[in-house]
């Protein structure tokens, strides 16, 4: 029977990866109710060696194992290297199989004189050395942020894990917007997947319209402003969107949003709340809440009227009638009077 390691050294600058690993470790404790009771989260900034020993040696409650997570471990390990190195190493030697000790070390790989290495390795190298000589008891897990070149592939993989699909151009564009911020990339993907729906592949245009580098100018903000009858704010959001997309593409997105609002209004008129909007429209909960809130600012008659006006704008753009930009500006003025 293989025994799981008792010491985990997580190092890197990818906080998303840290969270995923911690969630996996915690899930391994079994019943969520007892898992919380058997999880200790310690802060290396203020922890002393006695506090660590007490938590590590504690007996699990109604479970085979407990989890001890030491955040900001680099500061703790650096201090202990000077004051209590031998005592910490002795603790590692005596770690009970019933405890998983996780050392969370924030660090990053940098280049010095042409050679890449961990920036703060000196503060915890002695821990890594112990693990290297005790491979059955400890493990080092590198959690580096993806490089900018690797981000598009990373984004597409995460999108697939979340149940969505994204074309290559879309992933490249999203990577340009979020850099290698994996936490923000995950949040943006949640929004994009919800907007695209279950069947549609996320396109570069979706990214342009729903993901702004400065967190401004998305289609939801435009509809919010229209619902609030805030002409100035609506026009600002509209102009931000036109900087990122042509009017034809923008018309399609606004048209789709108001179709969703009509569907949400139908549910609400039948007494349904946001949870029923989510079920009927098959959207994520945060989108359902948003649609429920936005639809509440319009009557069904108003939504149908706006939808008709949007169809007219679409026709004008396609047939060369009134310029689309002017048509949208006039519509915003009418709706926010």
Image (cartoon, helix red, strand yellow):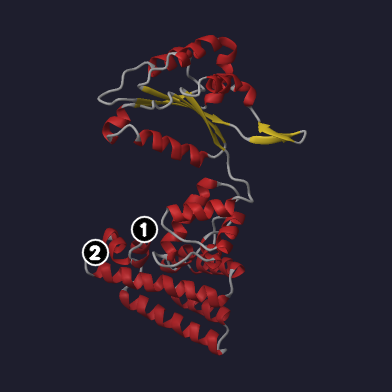
Residue 272 bears which disc, if any? 2
**Residue name at image x 49 percent, y 86 percent:** 315
**Residue name at image x 27 percent, y 34 percent:** 31
Q: Farthest residue to the front: give it.
A: 1
**The residue tagged with tag 1: helix, strand or loop?**
loop
| x then y, percent, for residue 298 | 35, 70
Q: Farthest residue to the left: give it.
A: 271
Q: Is residue 171 above or below residue 249?
A: above
Closest to the observer, 328 or 85? 85
Q: Quadrant of the N terminus?
A: top left
| x then y, percent, for residue 120 | 63, 27
Of the two numbered discs 1 and 2 in the rendering, the one whose residue sits closer to the viewer: 1
Residue 71 visible in this rendered orientation of the protein: no
Residue 164 visible in this rendered orientation of the protein: yes
- Taking 127 as reference, is 4 left or right? left
Q: Residues within 10 Å of mark 1 (few under 14, many from 20)?
A: some
Closest to the observer, 51 or 150? 150
User: In this figure, which residue is indicated by the disc labeled 1?
Assistant: 284
**The residue tagged with tag 2: helix, strand or loop?**
loop
| x then y, percent, for residue 271 | 22, 65
**Residue name at image x 46 percent, y 78 percent:** 334
């Amino acid at each position: 029977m293989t025994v799981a390691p008792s010491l985990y050294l997580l190092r890197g600058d990818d906080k998303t990866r840290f969270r995923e690993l911690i969630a996996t470790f915690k899930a391994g404790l079994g019943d969520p109710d007892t898992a919380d009771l058997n999880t200790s989260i310690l802060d290396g900034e203020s922890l002393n060696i006695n506090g660590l020993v007490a938590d590590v040696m504690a007996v699990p409650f109604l479970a085979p194992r407990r989890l001890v997570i030491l955040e900001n471990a680099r500061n703790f390990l650096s201090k202990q290297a000077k004051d209590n190195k031998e005592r910490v190493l002795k603790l590692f030697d005596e770690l009970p199989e019933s405890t998983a000790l996780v050392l969370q070390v924030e660090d990053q790989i940098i280049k010095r004189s042409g050679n890449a290495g961990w920036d703060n390795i000196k503060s915890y190298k002695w821990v890594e050395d112990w693990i290297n000589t005790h491979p059955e008891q400890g493990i080092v897990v590198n959690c580096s942020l993806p490089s900018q070149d690797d981000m598009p592939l990373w984004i597409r993989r995460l999108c697939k894990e979340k149940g969505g699909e994204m074309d290559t151009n879309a992933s490249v564009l999203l990577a340009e917007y979020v850099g290698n911020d994996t936490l923000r990339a995950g949040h943006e993907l949640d929004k994009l997947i919800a907007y695209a729906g279950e069947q549609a592949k996320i396109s570069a245009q979706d990214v342009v319209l729903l993901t702004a580098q400065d967190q401004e100018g998305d289609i939801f903000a435009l509809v919010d402003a229209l619902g609030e009858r805030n002409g100035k704010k609506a026009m600002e959001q509209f102009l931000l969107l036109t900087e990122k997309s042509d009017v034809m593409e923008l018309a399609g997105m606004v048209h789709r949003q108001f179709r969703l609002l009509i569907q949400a209004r139908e549910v609400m008129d039948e007494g349904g709340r946001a949870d029923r909007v989510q079920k009927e429209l098959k959207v994520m909960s945060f989108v359902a809440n948003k649609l429920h809130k936005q639809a509440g600012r319009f009557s069904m008659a108003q939504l149908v009227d706006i939808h008709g006006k949007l169809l007219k704008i679409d026709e004008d753009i396609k047939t060369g009638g009134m310029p689309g930009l002017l048509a949208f500006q006039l519509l915003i003025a009418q709706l926010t009077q």
